[in-house]
Image (cartoon, helix red, strand yellow):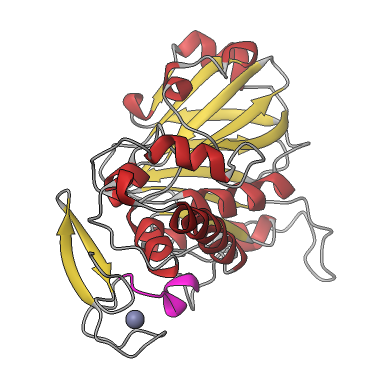
Amino acid sequence: MPELPEVETIRSGLAELLPGQRIAGVEVLLNKSLSAPESHITTHIAGAGVTDVRRRGKIMIVDLSSGYSLLVHLKMTGQLVFEAGGQQPAKPGTGTNEPHSCPNPTSETGDGRRVAGGHPTQSMAGDLPDKTTRVIFTFQDGSKLFFNDQRTFGWMKLVERSKVERDKCFMAMGVEPLGSQFEVCHLKSRLKHRKAAIKTLLLDQSHVAGLGNIYADEALHLAQVHPSREGQSLSDEEIERLHAAIIKVLGDSIQAGGTSFTSYVNANGITGDYLHNARVYRRQGEPCRACGTTIDKIKVGQRGTHICPNCQKLT
Ligand SMILES: [Zn+2]
């Protein structure tokens, strides 16, 4: 599942491309992927300009000039692929009156440049739409935004902009770990008196928004805290280390372009960089980068969890 750094990376990529674009049309291939009445799609999306692309937790918010916003949750297998159509200047020798015979229309009408994010599959680099495409937005300059979702748990929905913050999907969402409200005292207050495993508490979106399995494991290793320890057992110093570690692993991953995609996709590669440098995640059997001890994989609250048994002691 895409976590906060993956969503932030695709958000920042789209934030450079979408504002100023005007939506010419919307094609909904699977109704549940975009829950809005047909009349609302026609009135509030089609013809609207994109004014901003924001994020809260793992949910992307695309603000439209119609006074509405599109909320996008990629869930397990969702991905967004923006393909620049572009009204490129005609190249010498390619007269506009020539009949179109090129098998790849994007190379004829624009540069075909792509920005993609979310669950990594070949759809990011292959011809679109394909069988996983659920919604297609077409922009006035010929660019397209594809919402692909193999398992169809992802969703988009249309909400009045003034009601976005009060939408039920944000009601139980905790603070942004990269925002100014995420302070050590906040984390302390969320962990004190709680007997649940620290990893389980970190995955609870009501404490901190956007942390998932990858970054919980990574942050706990960096902070040298065993994921099974009760939240209330952490010392002030450990909470301070954990707070700093959460910010660092998320920041590092955003800088590396997330774990699971590249921001600019081409046919040669669709994997992100962060996992190549992961501390523990999916490195069971390999040596800890800090001490050389073999990384172990255990279960914490039903979730596969990666630890260094030497750096992260249970007692
Ligand atoms: Zn170690």
Magenta-colored stretch includes residue 224: no
Quadrant hosting ligand 1: bottom left
The image quadrant that residue 271 belongs to is: bottom left
The image quadrant that residue 179 belongs to is: top right
Q: Is residue 47 above or below residue 145?
A: above
Where residue 250 appears, as percent x and y from the top left, is 53, 58
Residue in the foreground of this view, choosing between 235 and 243: 235
**Is residue 185 toward the left or the right of residue 193 in the image?**
right
Q: Give the residue drawn at x 56%, y 56%.
A: 247
Residue in the foreground of this view, choosing between 18 and 112: 18
Residue in the foreground of this view, choosing between 86 and 118: 118
- The magenta segment: 273-281
Q: Is residue 71 above or below residue 271?
A: above
Q: Give the residue drawn at x 26%, y 68%.
A: 306
**Is residue 114 toward the left or the right of residue 3 in the image?**
right
Where residue 252 appears, as percent x and y from the top left, is 57, 66
Q: Give the residue drawn at x 23%, y 64%.
A: 315
The image quadrant that residue 172 belongs to is: top left
Residue in the foreground of this view, choosing between 257 and 278: 278
Q: Is residue 26 above or below residue 302?
A: above
Q: Report if residue 162 is visible in the image.
A: yes
Where residue 218 appears, as percent x and y from the top left, is 40, 65
Question: How many numbered circles are shown?
Answer: 0
Where residue 225 appears, as percent x and y from the top left, is 35, 63
Q: Report if residue 149 is visible in the image.
A: no
Q: Is residue 125 above or below residue 195?
A: below
Q: Give the residue drawn at x 45%, y 60%.
A: 124
